[in-house]
Image (cartoon, rainbow, N blue to C red):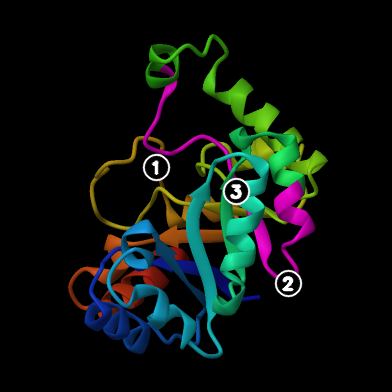
Amino acid sequence: MKNKIFIAIDTKSKKKAKLIISQSKSRNFKIGYKFGLEFLNSKNGRKFISKLKNKIIFVDLKLNDIPNTMSSTLIALKDLNINYLTVHISSGLKALKEVKKVSGKTKIVGVTTLTSLDNKDLKSFGHKRSLKEIVILQAKLARKAKLDAIVCSPHEAKFVKKYFNKEIITPGIRIFSKLGDQKRVMTAKDAFKQGSDWLVIGRDLTKGNIKSNFKKLSDHLSQ
């Protein structure tokens, strides 16, 4: 079975996005493309995504609003033929169920706690439980809402699997770069060992020579 990688298209440049897609074909990996707020809100970004054919499209909007707004947003995105769409689990059970109800073929991905946060951050805005306890509660809620996948840090993947038995997608993956703006990070090889089904990799693949970076990733995973 091929390792599964979502490439984060962290740009607002249509030209850069085209380059990443054209140079990221690989026999060794199953590839999807993650588009976030930056690209989708850029001029012609939405139009660009709507024209992509035969690609696995992951739209990372992290919806977090009242139930009606969230479900209406998904309906408004139907023309993009999205394969995966993120919503914050913290939006609550009713909102998650409403989104799932109108999702059709789009897999709804519940976001647990952002990888840019740690226990100190959570405490600063009122959480008394530990990060691990919060993520477990979020995983249980995602299961109750019958979501299709979860986004969590690779550090949480192993115990999330105990409460949620569908796809686990992990950002915060590093091949050879530093932490950047994420705190709970891990190498690609270790993340797969922890139980991640999909890895989200951005700069480590898209900065510099993309084909060379893929070779380094393959070498890293085969060590």
Tag 2 residue:
105
CA gap between label 2 and label 3 equals 19 Å
Q: Nearer the viewer, residue 25 or 48?
A: 48
Tag 3 residue:
69
Q: Nearer the viewer, residue 104 or 139?
A: 104
Which element carries disc 2, helix, strand or loop? Answer: loop
| Among numbered discs 1 and 3, the one appearing first in the sequence | 3
Residue 180 shown left or right of residue 74 in the figure: left
Q: Is residue 47 above or below residue 181?
A: below
Q: Do the CB atoms of the residues marked 1 and 3 lie less than 8 Å apart?
A: no
Mark 2 is surrounded, within 10 Å at the Cα level, by few (under 14), some (14 to 19) or many (20 or more) other residues, namely few
Q: Which quadrant holds residue 166? A: bottom right
Q: Which amino acid does the dot numbered 2 rest on?
A: Lys
Give the percent coordinates (x, y) of residue 108.
66, 57
| Among numbered discs 1 and 2, the one appearing first in the sequence | 2
Give the percent coordinates (x, y) of residue 11.
26, 66
Q: Which quadrant holds residue 188? A: bottom left
Of badges 1 and 2, the one in the foreground is 2
Residue 185: assigned label: 1
Q: How many marks?
A: 3
Of badges 2 and 3, the one in the foreground is 3
Q: Which amino acid does the dot numbered 1 rest on?
A: Val
Q: Is residue 137 above or below residue 111?
A: above
Q: Quadrant of the N terminus?
A: bottom right
Q: Please provide the residue range marked out in magenta.
A: 98-119
Q: Quadrant of the C terminus?
A: bottom left
Mark 3 is surrounded, within 10 Å at the Cα level, by few (under 14), some (14 to 19) or many (20 or more) other residues, namely some
Which element carries disc 1, helix, strand or loop? Answer: loop
